[in-house]
Image (cartoon, rainbow, N blue to C red):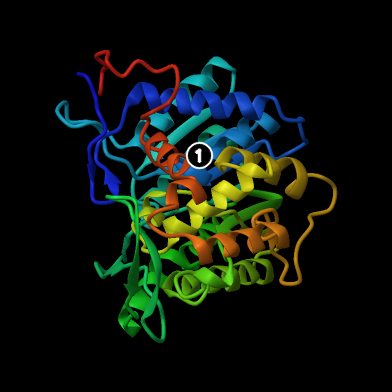
Amino acid sequence: MVVEPKVRGFICITAHPEGCKENVRRQIEYAKAQEKKETPKKVLVIGCSTGYGLASRISAAYIGGADTLGVMFEKESNGKRTATPGLYNTRAFEEFAKQDGLYAKSINGDAFSKEIKDEVIETIKNDMGKVDMVIYSLAAPRRTMADGTVYQSSLKTTGEDFTQKSWNLENDTICEATIPSATAEEIEGTVKVMGGEDWVDWIEALKSADVLADNAITVAYSYIGPELTYPVYYHGTIGKAKDHLYESSKKINDQFDGVKAYISVNKALVTQASSAIPIVPLYFSILYKVMKAKNIHEGCIEQMARLFTEKLFNGSVPVDEKGMIRLDDWEMREDVQSEVMDIWGKINSDNIKELADIDGYWSDFFNMFGFKIDGVDYTKDVDIM
């Protein structure tokens, strides 16, 4: 089958297996080129198949030589529709890891469920003994509780509605967009799905089963961003969830002996979720333009490689006043933000292609699904199974 990108709204509903494989291969090559560090050797990655989770797994394996166990929730191909990109990414990673003599196994299922936690624990006991690092990089739209209650996440403001400039992705024009305020129920749902409750549940389950090594490290990821996006992120529903994630890191540190929990605040990058949020893609595309001009732009693999080589495993762990690792340090540099805000004030429909990195944004978007990657022949038939 010849696979082409099919975009509906802000999501691509197809994925290219060979493109995904090439994307993974390039991230592996980048990780291989980094300085080797004495990092954990048995790593569990919860949310391992795309974005920061995938890049974390690649960094653990190819910077530190770790055996990795991954948890994902991806759809297989049915022969007519492609699998999700995360499934192709994971299969490719496992193939490369095996070739390089690294243990890599993945479990496909709902990471929120007790069944998957039990399966992971059994796999660790049988194959790894204990894990010395747990990366929590789960990105899910909903969560089903043990009693059947379903919580849904919402990307909204809290307090008042928020209106600001936005980029119409369909025709490359600047418009105004309003993000509505969330209800109390929507805030609760977002915290349940995107907060730290499940992270704590995982650590508790692993600790109780005695599959966490002494002095194990666990890391979860967050984002803060500039004041411009505070109503969407920092003060929005997702910000409430990230506050809960931060409090959960403190809870893990207080309650579980021999486990050290960190929050890593990462850089703004194009994801399936961020593409759907008004205002945010415009900020991202301007940020890309500024950071690339300064030669400090990073994608997921560059961020995670820096986490492993410069932040977590380079003697002492540098943290801010709240104890968080700041991988957004280059994004939040004063010179970067002042230029971004200057462009934000000037940008309009006539100059958007000049002042923002439109091509870079779309390149990252399609790359997530295995498309528009140099060296891949998209005219050839591929096996989507």
Q: Is residue 302 above or below residue 183?
A: above
**Looking at the image, can residue 122 be seen?**
no
Q: Residue furthest front?
A: 350
At numbered mark 1, what does the secondary structure look like: helix, strand or loop? Answer: helix
In front: 296, or 80? Answer: 296
Name the amino acid, label 1.
Leu
Residue 249 on image: x %, y %: 62, 66
Residue 352 on image: x %, y %: 43, 52
Name the residue at 76% across, 30% down: 36
Residue 261 sits in which quadrant? bottom right
In front: 356, or 213? Answer: 356
Residue 141 on image: x %, y %: 33, 59
Name the residue at 64% across, 43% down: 293
Residue 2 sits in which quadrant? top left
Name the residue at 31% across, 83% down: 183
Residue wearing tag 1 = 54
Residue 165 sits in which quadrant? bottom left
> Within 10 angstroms of label 1, few (less than 14), some, or many (20 or more) residues?
many
Residue 378 on image: x %, y %: 31, 19
In this rendering, would 156 be left or right of 81? right
Q: Is residue 296 above or below residue 221?
A: above
Name the residue at 39% across, 78% down: 162
Q: Quadrant of the N terminus?
A: top left
In front: 135, or 281? Answer: 281
